[in-house]
Image (tube, rainbow, N blue to C red):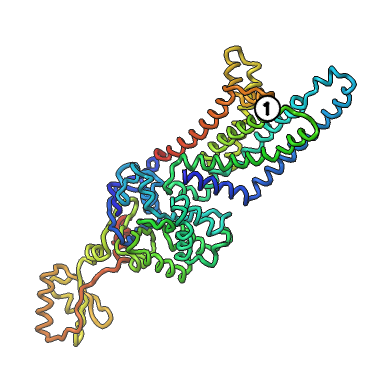
Amino acid sequence: MIEVNNLTRKYGEKVAVNRISFSVEKGKIWGFLGPNGAGKTTTMRILTGYLPPTEGSAKVAGFDITKEPLKAKKHIGYLPEIPPLYNEMTVKGYVNFVAELKGVPSKERKKAVSQAIEKAGLSNVAGRLIKNLSKGYRQRVGIAQAIVNNPDILILDEPTIGLDPAQIIEIRELIKSLKGEHTVILSTHILPEVTQTCDGVVIINEGQLRASGTLEEIQERFSEESGIYLETEPSLAVEELMNIEGIKEAVSSGEGVKIFWEEEEKGNKNLNEFIRTKGLNINEWKRLTSTLEDIYLKIVASDKGGVK
Amino acid sequence: MRGMWAITKKEIKTYLTSPIAYVLIAVFLLISGYFFYNMIWWFNSQSIAMSRNPYYMKQLNINRFVYEPLFHNISVILLLIFPLLTMRLFAEEKRTGTEELLYTSSITNGEIVYGKFFGATFVLFIMLLLTGVYAVFGYLYSKPETIPLLLGYLGLFLMGIAFIGIGIFFSSITESQVVAASLSFGMLLLLWVLSWSGQAAGPSLKPILNYLSFFEHFKDMPRGVLNLTDLVYYLSVTYFFLFLTQSYMESRRWR
């Protein structure tokens, strides 16, 4: 549904986005992750046709965004970082204006507008002037305008920013409910948002693509070098474990021990032998996996050349 | 076309729901009404004074002594007012970020520019329509000639759309409404006074400066003469600046 190829955008000498490539399947929610100033907004602006790329190409719904912008834009709903609202309009008037702008046929417009307003939870403020709305409601008006033409692709730039926790949950539920019918790309720097709503993730930093894939793929690829969590009866002594060849480090953790390999195969063999000779009962044995947060911090920190 | 119409409607609604248009229309009517009153009053006293002499009486022509100068005055008021009316058209969208909505909708830059142009033209139309009271007054109490009146209005309308074209261009190149208004005001003044320096300039430069001047092309219309060059001048100035606006929008590609 979305194919990005070697996308580059320069502002004068500054390279904001540097040779990014990724693709998103139809009907999925994809998270766009990166610290502030990483190039998330620039990439989204290119995808929506607001900014042209300096190099590279982006295909949206089968149309190249620079070669056939009008056709591509028809399939896109976009919520920019700052919702593009006209303060002097009413909610309904505004959503209707956007529907007209996006070419919703006049026969279906009334229905499309009321559906978008309902989906975004704005029914009780539909007649009010946008300038009198609170920030949470303004954000929702932004979402309502993005979905009013029932686009195949929704691009949401930090959709939950500035909302209170209850609103964040509501907006997340709203986004999840759009899945399947719409392909969604949302940018954020809130990690739980990605794990809770997204199927896949693109991590960028300093304009460069750091990782992309489904959450499982990413987790597999970037998990801690290797290690296990082990709980036995009677419990293990950390000092003894450290003496086993192939084990780099052992740390007690709760009821059990976290063991990190120096050489996984060798360590595993020696550890098994150790357990057998001691006659220990194994209560729990599992691989250590990293959370997305660990992975993200690792990627971003390594870019700074800092702590690993 | 659909996108243009949507934008035109939105601009008209914005003008009608914000105080700017009302204030400007009110100021416009107040000043032009003041001029009209003075001219009528002067014409009236002249008529009384000359009523004893049939020869002089024949020379008195309400078109020439009231409407022609009135149209000239109105054109100057429009020049002062229009930069204020057009300054927000693009500058405000840039400042508030709503241009992102326009540029990411499936409409062309041309539709955006002309949508806004027709929105502002609507206000011009309303302004001129309201001054129709002065013409009605003339028909009630005198016998003005219709063709010069109509051509005078046509001239004002053409000049007005050229003002709008220039205003839109300067609004599109800045985020600040004050800067937009200042630049378009400066440009309009320049095009106004060009013919003055035409008097001083040499014989080769004079026709060029005269040709470029706004008011040189307006002179003949309230007298009942429509020159094709005048018509072409106003339409091409308008088109030129709207075209510049579009080109400037396209040039975002390389910035």
Quarter of the image containing the C terminus of chain B?
top left
Indicate the quadrant where residue B191 lies.
Answer: top right
Residue B94 visible at all = no
Circle 1 residues within 10 Å: few <14, some 14–19, many ≥20: some
Closest to the observer, A4 or A274: A4
Drawn side of residue B63 relative to residue B204, left or right = right
SS class, disc 1: helix
Which residue occupies the foreground of this view, A23 or B76? B76
Residue A6: where, in percent of width, then height? 28, 47
Residue tagged by mark 1? Answer: B147
Q: Is residue B230 above or below residue A148?
A: above
Protein chain holding label 1: B
| Image position, residue A280 (x, y; %) | 14, 85
The picture places residue B55, in percent across and down from the top left corner, at: 84, 17
Depicted A121 relative to depicted B88: above or below: below
Q: In front here: A293 or B47? A: B47
> Label 1 sits on what residue type?
Ile
Instruction: Kindly give the residue lying farthest to the top in the view shown.
Output: B203
Task: Give the side of residue A249 with respect to residue B166, left or right.
Answer: left
The answer to which of A131 and B152 lies nearer the viewer is B152
Q: Is residue A266 visible?
A: yes
